[in-house]
Image: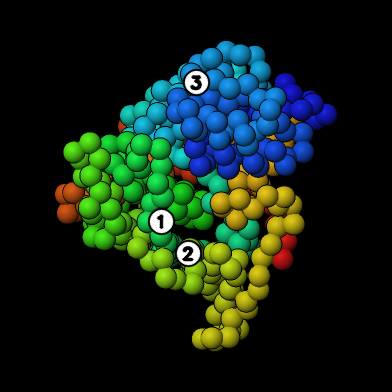
């Protein structure tokens, strides 16, 4: 076990955009250092080495990194379609693991990794990277819901209106085959937030979506890009609560990229990103246009990066769990459900009907939400 006064040595597998994000966060993380990187792509290896510094060991095969003895913890940030096999190799070691979203591109591989993780040493932490949970204003929204401001939450609405997919190595993110599809690759974050807010697992998904604007004229090796660029997804929960995702990836001209609202019988809470604005309205106290509004910040953030400082806060919690032996705040089971919801949404679009989660998930994997750990990620932000 790593002691509180020890340096935690990180390896990073996959040093594209998200891998570099993790390296830059660890560079400013007290008690953390990147000692090894691995990537099959030469330019990405060079970029990772430049970000990590001259003392980093560089590998072109992730298995060499895993066997090097240079790391205590390993981040997997490689392309989606490589997650399953790389994570499987990692989970056969006793190294601490931080696995980027989505866990895999489909439910079968998720279940395979969960089974491998169950065989790991109790001292090896396996953490699902869901950095949107750690965005300051989103974490505050969850705290307000937990405090009872809205009463029992009945409706969750999440809107992401943003720019198209960025360019990635060999354009892997232009294809459903390699990403799992837009509603796995992009929006598993939001499905995870729905479950976190409602402290439930869903039973039904109904979706409508298409590729209407983006990447229509992009052809790679004779194949047309096939990623959806807009969708509505309705998610039903056993309690009768429901959630809505509104995704548009050709909405560059917008004020707020992300908007989350939670409504119950006694009020409504809203969070807006990137302005980090929180709005709280209490029925019988506030009227239309007269709700409380304030900015939310987390003074622990030492690196803003690409996700408004949330990746840094995630690493703070991860390294603390390594040092104390605490359970992971976000589990592979959380990642599995987020993938399954995305898979169900794509199937719903293809079939033109609602899809039950029981149609695509193993019966013995449909566990209730672990409410005893639901608040763990929410600690620490300030206003």
Q: Distance between the residues labelled 2 and 3?
A: 36 Å
Q: What element carries label 1?
A: loop
Name the quadrant of the C terminus.
bottom right
**Viewer-side residue, 246 vs 285:** 246
Q: How crowded is mark 3: few (under 14 residues within 10 Å), some or many (20 or more)?
A: some
**Looking at the rendering, which quadrant does residue 154 occupy?**
bottom left
The residue that appears at 48% across and 32% down in the rendered structure is: 43
Q: Where is residue 230 in the image (x, y as percent from the top left)?
A: 30, 59
The reply to whether callout 2 and callout 3 are in contact (CB within 8 Å) is: no
Q: Where is residue 292 in the image (x, y as percent from the top left)?
A: 63, 78
Residue 350 left/right relative to 30: left
Which of discs 1 and 2 lies nearer the camera? The answer is 2
Which of discs 1 and 3 lies nearer the camera? The answer is 3
Name the quadrant of the N terminus.
top right
Q: Is mark 3 on a helix, strand or loop?
A: loop
Residue position for label 1: 239
Tell me if residue 171 comes above or below residue 33 in the rendering: below
* Residue 216 visible in the displayed image: yes
The residue that appears at 63% across and 21% down in the rendered structure is: 57
Residue position for label 2: 257
Residue that sits furthest to the left in the current view: 351
Residue that sits furthest to the right in the current view: 5
Residue position for label 3: 60
- Give the total of numbered labels: 3
Check residue 28 in the rendering and tell me which mark sits there, or answer none. none
Q: Residues within 10 Å of mark 1 (few under 14, many from 20)?
A: few
The residue that appears at 66% across and 47% down in the rendered structure is: 313
Tell me if residue 213 comes above or below residue 166 in the rendering: below
In terms of sequence position, does the residue under pointer 1 or pointer 3 come before the other? Answer: 3
Q: What element carries label 2?
A: loop
């Amino acid at each position: 076990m790593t002691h509180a006064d020890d340096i935690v040595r990180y390896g990073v597998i996959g040093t594209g955009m998200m891998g570099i994000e993790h390296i830059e966060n660890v560079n400013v993380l007290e008690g953390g250092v990147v000692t090894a990187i691995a990537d099959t792509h030469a330019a990405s290896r060079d970029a990772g080495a430049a970000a990590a510094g001259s003392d980093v060991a560089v590998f072109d095969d992730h298995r060499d990194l895993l066997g090097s003895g240079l790391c205590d913890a390993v981040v997997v940030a490689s392309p989606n379609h490589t997650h399953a096999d790389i994570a499987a190799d990692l989970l056969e070691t006793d190294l601490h693991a931080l696995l980027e979203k989505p866990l895999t591109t489909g439910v079968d591989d998720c279940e395979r990794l969960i089974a491998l993780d169950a065989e790991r040493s109790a001292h090896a932490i396996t953490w699902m990277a869901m950095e949107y949970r750690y965005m300051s204003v989103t974490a505050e929204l969850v705290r307000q819901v937990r405090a009872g401001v809205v009463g029992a939450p009945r409706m969750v609405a999440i809107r992401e209106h943003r720019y198209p997919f960025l360019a990635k190595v060999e354009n892997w993110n232009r294809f459903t085959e390699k990403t799992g599809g837009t509603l796995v690759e992009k929006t598993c974050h939001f499905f995870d937030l729905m479950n976190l807010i409602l402290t439930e697992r869903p039973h039904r998904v109904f979706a409508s979506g298409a590729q209407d604007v983006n990447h229509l004229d992009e052809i790679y090796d004779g194949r047309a890009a096939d990623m959806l660029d807009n969708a509505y997804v309705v998610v039903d929960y056993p309690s009768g609560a429901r959630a809505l995702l509104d995704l548009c990836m050709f909405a560059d001209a917008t004020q707020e990229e992300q908007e989350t609202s939670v409504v119950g019988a006694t009020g409504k809470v809203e969070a807006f990103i990137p302005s980090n604005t929180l709005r709280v309205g209490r029925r019988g106290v506030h009227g239309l246009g007269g709700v409380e509004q304030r900015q939310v910040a987390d003074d622990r953030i030492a690196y803003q990066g690409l996700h408004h400082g949330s990746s840094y806060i995630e690493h703070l919690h991860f390294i603390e769990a390594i040092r104390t032996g605490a359970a992971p705040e976000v589990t592979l089971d959380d990642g599995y459900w987020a993938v399954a919801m995305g898979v169900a949404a794509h199937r719903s679009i293809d079939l033109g009907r609602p899809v039950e989660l029981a149609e695509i998930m193993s019966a013995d994997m449909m566990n209730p939400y672990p409410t005893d750990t639901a608040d763990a990620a929410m600690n620490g932000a300030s206003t």
